[in-house]
Amino acid sequence: MSNSTLEQAEIKVTTKAVNQIRQVMQENNIPENYGLRVGVKAGGCSGLSYSLGFDSGAHEGDKVIDVDGVKLFVDGKSLFYLSGAELDYTDGLNGKGFVFSNPKATKTCGCGNSFSA
């Protein structure tokens, strides 16, 4: 495992993404016991889109993934599409934000926020 990518279960999360999740939580006074809900929902120009949001805890059927002290909550349906994916954070010239690199995506849109599998 490289120093720049933290791998846990089926989803990889870069160190940069973990640090940004912590920063967002701190800046928005989100309690430390909360976690990031990572999901996939219908929508977007390619059929499916990624969703991110903070949640107070896991729901029934969720996979709870701990990445260097940051909790991720992923429902079973989303985990099917996200297995093998990597969550990163970019702050380059094309904008700032979380980005997914997903080997299951067979087609993506230009903005990178939606995909089909």
Image (spheres, rainbow, N blue to C red):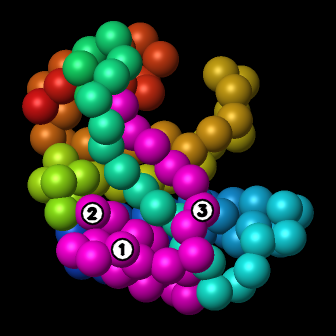
Q: Residues within 10 Å of mark 2 (few under 14, many from 20)?
A: some
Name which of mark 2 and mark 1 comes first in the sequence.
Answer: 1
Q: Name the secondary structure under disc 3.
A: strand
Q: Residues within 10 Å of mark 3 (few under 14, many from 20)?
A: some
Mark 2 to mark 3 CA distance (whole Å):
14 Å
Question: Answer yes or no: do the residues labelled 2 and 1 have beta carbons within 8 Å?
Answer: yes
The quadrant in which the C terminus is found is: top left
Pointer 1: what residue?
A: 59
**Residue at the image position 70 percent from the left and 84 percent from the top:** 32
Please indicate whether residue 26 sits to the left or right of residue 107 in the image: right
Name which of mark 1 and mark 3 comes first in the sequence.
Answer: 3
Q: Which circle marks residue 54 in the picture? A: 3
Mark 2 to mark 1 CA distance (whole Å):
8 Å
Q: Which circle marks residue 31 in the picture? A: none
Residue type indicated by callout 2: Asp
Magenta residue span: 49-75
Please indicate whether residue 95 sits to the left or right of residue 117 in the image: right
Percent across and percent down for residue 109 are: 35, 14
**Residue at the image position 60 percent from the left and 62 percent from the top:** 54
Q: Nearer the viewer, mark 1 or mark 3?
A: 1
Q: Name the secondary structure under disc 1.
A: loop
Pointer 2: what residue?
A: 75
Position of 69 relative to 58 (above/below): below
**Residue at the image position 27 percent from the left and 63 percent from the top:** 75
